[in-house]
Image: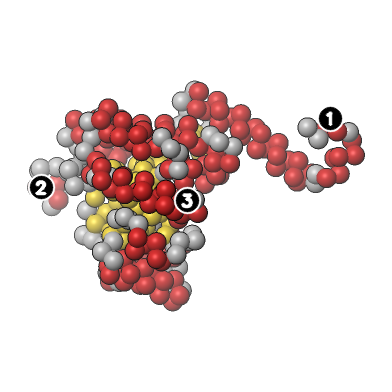
Amino acid sequence: KAKDAGRNTYRFYSPEMQAMSDERMLMDKAMHDAIDNKEFELYFQPQNSFDGSCIGAEVLIRWPRVDGSFTPPGVFIPLAEEIGLITGIGDWVMEESFRQLSIWIKEGFWQSHWKLSINVSAIQFQQAEFLVALEMLLTKYALSAKLIDLEITESMLLGDLTVSRKKMNKIRELGVFLSIDDFGTGYSSLKYLKTLPINRLKIDQSFVRDLLIDSSDAAIIAAIIAMAKALDIEVIAEGVETEEHYCELQHMGCDRFQGYYFGRPMPAVEFVKNFSVTSDPTKYI
Ligand code: C2E
Ligand code: MG
Ligand code: MG
Ligand code: MG
């Protein structure tokens, strides 16, 4: 500890740095407690086809605070990755997602052509046990692999590419789908797309946000769509917030969408309420 080394060492830390590390230590403790006390929840956000119908959901973790707000995953997930808690959290997300999906199948809610997309941290993906854990969960919950989509990021490619490629191939052999999340923001070289068994690119929401006012964002999206089509990879646009986004993306040849325009992330109960497919045709009139 800096304190043990004597007062003089304090000058190496600015007050801002000290406050930052205090906050991180508090968060570290709070996250350990959150795992032990099962404080995390899963929310589900719809993914939609060209015509707007539901084609599945992305699972997004939520960590409620006592006041009813949430600690954003964009804040605590990177920290969990740094301090080695992400595999514990990631394992929980996987198991809980599989459990929920198996319930939805039994209830007849989940449609056989829908996929459940689960975010997998690069660190979790790179664990030697990841593949075995995935297979065990598929067996335990008696799930068809084709219902599962794993969202990985380009940072996964920073590790040993040969190892990652082998693992991805085995995942595909199981029948599980693979998506690259936040596509266009990372380090991936386009040649990886040719050699890796990727099923879907998720166009990052930062390109979608200003699509209608920034022609370079529009150009990047058009390029991603054209490349994906040529390589026979699916595309989905993230951050589709308005009808204008939806129409413009449709016009550009994008055929899958996710965003507030179609639905915000919501608890499982609400997801069922909003996206039940009814056999009653009057519902659509
Ligand atoms: P992501 O995987 O790219 O997830 C999409 C994020 O965009 C989510 O933020 C979602 O709520 C948000 N979003 C969806 N539609 C819209 C929209 O129309 N407009 C805007 N502005 N935002 C939209 P969220 O839930 O805060 O998650 C942030 C990130 O945290 C995720 O980005 C993902 O990287 C990470 N994350 C969330 N849950 C998990 C998890 O279970 N495991 C792991 N490893 N990471 C997770
Ligand atoms: Mg994602
Ligand atoms: Mg994303
Ligand atoms: Mg993201």
Which tag, 2 or 3, sits closer to the chain's start?
Answer: 3
Question: Could you classify mark 1 by the number of other residues whose Cα lies within 10 Å: few (under 14), some (14-19), or many (20 or more)?
Answer: few
Q: Is residue 173 above or below residue 96?
A: below
Q: Distance between the residues labelled 1 and 3?
A: 40 Å
Tell me the residue that label 1 is attached to.
4
User: Which secondary structure lies at badge 3?
Assistant: loop
Which tag, 1 or 3, sits closer to the chain's start?
Answer: 1
Label 1 sits on what residue type?
Answer: Asp
In the image, taking residue 257 as reference, residue 146 lies left or right, namely left
Residue 50 at what x, y percent from top left? Answer: 23, 61
Residue at the image position 10 percent from the left and 43 percent from the top: 280
Question: Could you classify mark 2 by the number of other residues whose Cα lies within 10 Å: few (under 14), some (14-19), or many (20 or more)?
Answer: few
User: Marks 1 and 3: CB-CB under 8 Å?
Assistant: no
Q: How far apart are marks 2 and 3 (CA)?
A: 54 Å
Residue 140 at what x, y percent from top left? Answer: 27, 27
Query: Which residue of the protein is positioned furthest toward the top in this rendering?
Result: 37
Q: Which mark is residue 160?
A: 3
Q: Quadrant of residue 269?
A: top left
Label 2 sits on what residue type?
Answer: Thr
User: Which secondary structure lies at badge 1?
Assistant: helix
Tell me the residue that label 2 is attached to.
282
Label 3 sits on what residue type?
Answer: Asp
Which tag, 1 or 2, sits closer to the chain's start?
Answer: 1
Question: Could you classify mark 3 by the number of other residues whose Cα lies within 10 Å: few (under 14), some (14-19), or many (20 or more)?
Answer: few
Quarter that holds the N terminus: top right
Residue at the image position 24 percent from the left and 57 percent from the top: 49
User: Which secondary structure lies at badge 2?
Assistant: helix
Residue 28 at what x, y percent from top left? Answer: 61, 33
Is disc 2's CB within 8 Å of ligand 1? no
Mark nearest the camera among 2 and 3 is: 3
